[in-house]
Amino acid sequence: MAEPETTTDTIAAISTPSGRGGIGIVRLSGPDAASIAAQLVRLHQPLEHMRVRMADVLDAPHTGADADRIDEALVTFFAAPHSYTAEDLVEIAAHGSPVVLELLLNRALSLGARLAEPGEFTKRAFLAGRLDLTQAEAVRDLIDAQTLTQARLAASQMGGALSRRVGPVKQALVELIALLEAGIDFAEDDVEVTPQAEIARRITELTPPLTALEASFARGRIVHDGLTLAIVGRPNAGKSSLFNCLAEHDRAIVTATPGTTRDTVTERISLDGIPLELVDTAGLREAGEEVEQLGIARSREALADAALVVLVLDATEPLNDEERRLLAAVQGRPAVVAVNKSDLIEASRPLPDYADMLGAPSSPRSVRKGLESIPALATSALTGEGIPALRERILALATGGASAEPGMLTNLRQQQAIAAALTALNKAAQANAASIPHEMILLDLYQALWALDSLTGQTTPDDILNLIFSTFCIGK
């Protein structure tokens, strides 16, 4: 964790979103927070740690009894070090009028406070040792959460789940380093040199938990960032109807006329906590009309950019050349074929060309027309047949089968830190196997330790810290 850092200035910011609301909060942190707050409002009682005080927001910048009141406020004082930032911190909760909040903030700045930079409150908490870097990042993630699963993951990280997962590995690594250092420093005092087999055993024990942690990034990244899913196919295959089924409301216009969708339509949904951006595309076909041509071009762009693809086929029509090209285009990509309008096929009626694509509505089958197997499901946007199975298949494609677990890696910076630690440990193991002197093995072990330290922020350069906290909102 970062070394505690003492600040001499007081910062202020509006900590609630811009616009009107029931409540708005102005926050101050620093050595002069309490004295500035006492001049901003007319307190009914003196400030006291962790006590809420009634106060009047005045129309004039003084607290005399004759000053006109324009609002009431609740003022809460947190004395250092028992606050979010480990500094004196004051929160003034007034009614959420932008005019009143700006008045309070401007007065605070005129009394000596400085406007807080994005994320500066949390950065001060980090620098004071109240949070490590993974917990600070989780604060931002919680604010940005769009699904309950994202919020739960962020709350877990704020509670130190990732730090606790790394802690035992780091402790074991420090013990190994100390063991080798002792053997080098006190060789003349008959301190036993650590055997090669013992070093190998200890390094081997460090690797599995870090490997499992790195693997958690597959699921954590998706929960954190979400994915884009493109729904493609020929005109009138039922793409927009399936889009509405997945979105669970009528977002896209649906008619029996082919080519109704002329442009991409998007909608964000949560699928078992995974944020998905659904993209309904224009039907792919040869088109002479300029507007439809532009829509088809955007459809192809969406197909190329999407992380997941649902290719919609019409169960009442044989495959055409465009659909065969689409099947070839999604080979090797996370994709599923939805054979739509399956409710229109009579059980006794043979299906055209691709009868092997349709089986029981809930059972994945395959498209095999000289191509690799692509999972296929019979669906009906009209009756809902196969829609639950389609959701399950999309979720399986999105997560790659990875399950949720406490302390997952959620961003590339974290994954790179763990990957660097694993690389350094692998080099140390190779050096040990080659009987290279312990001084050289220690260099690799220290590289692994520094990588783990960068995860929590102990050795993270200032420019990286500034980049991380600049992505926060002002006031947090």
Image (cartoon, grey):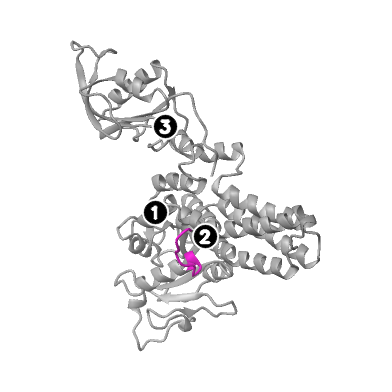
Report crowding for label 1: few under 14, some 14 to 19, many 20 or more residues within 10 A (C-alpha).
Answer: some
The answer to whether 26 appears left or right of 329 in the picture is left
Looking at marks 2 and 1 on the same chain, the residue that comes earlier in the sequence is marked by 1
Q: Relative to the observer, which residue lies in front, 368 or 373?
A: 373
Range of magenta residues: 397-407
- On residue 268, the disc is 1
Rendered view: 14 above or below 226: above
Distance (Cα) linking label 2 and label 1: 14 Å
Q: In the rendered picture of this protein, how many numbered marks are placed on residues?
A: 3
Observer-nearest residue: 141 or 120? 120
Q: Which residue sits at x=30%, y=58%?
A: 249
- Name the element at disc 2: loop
Number of other residues with Cα within 10 Å of mark 3, as a class: few under 14, some 14 to 19, many 20 or more: many
Look at the image and tell me in which quarter the N terminus lies: top right
Q: Which residue is mark 2?
A: 307
Q: Amino acid at mark 2?
A: Ala
Along the line of sight, the residue nearer the viewer: 464 or 186: 186
Between 277 and 163, the residue placed more toward the observer is: 163
**Residue 231 drawn at (x, y percent):** 45, 62
Type of amino acid at the residue the image marks with label 3: Glu
Answer whether labels 1 and 3 touch (C-beta < 8 Å): no
Q: Residue at x 53, y 41 (%)?
A: 468
> Could you tell which of marks 3 and 2 lies nearer the N-terminus?
3
Task: Give x and y (percent) for residue 438.
Answer: 77, 58
- The quarter of the picture where the C terminus appears is top left
- Judged by its main secondary structure, the magenta piece is loop
Q: Name the residue that disc number 3 marks.
A: 87
Find the distance from the CA under tag 3 to the CA under tag 2.
Answer: 45 Å
Q: Do we see residue 317 in this rendering?
A: no
Q: Position of residue 24 (x, y in %)?
A: 29, 32
Relative to 465, say whether 327 is above or below: below
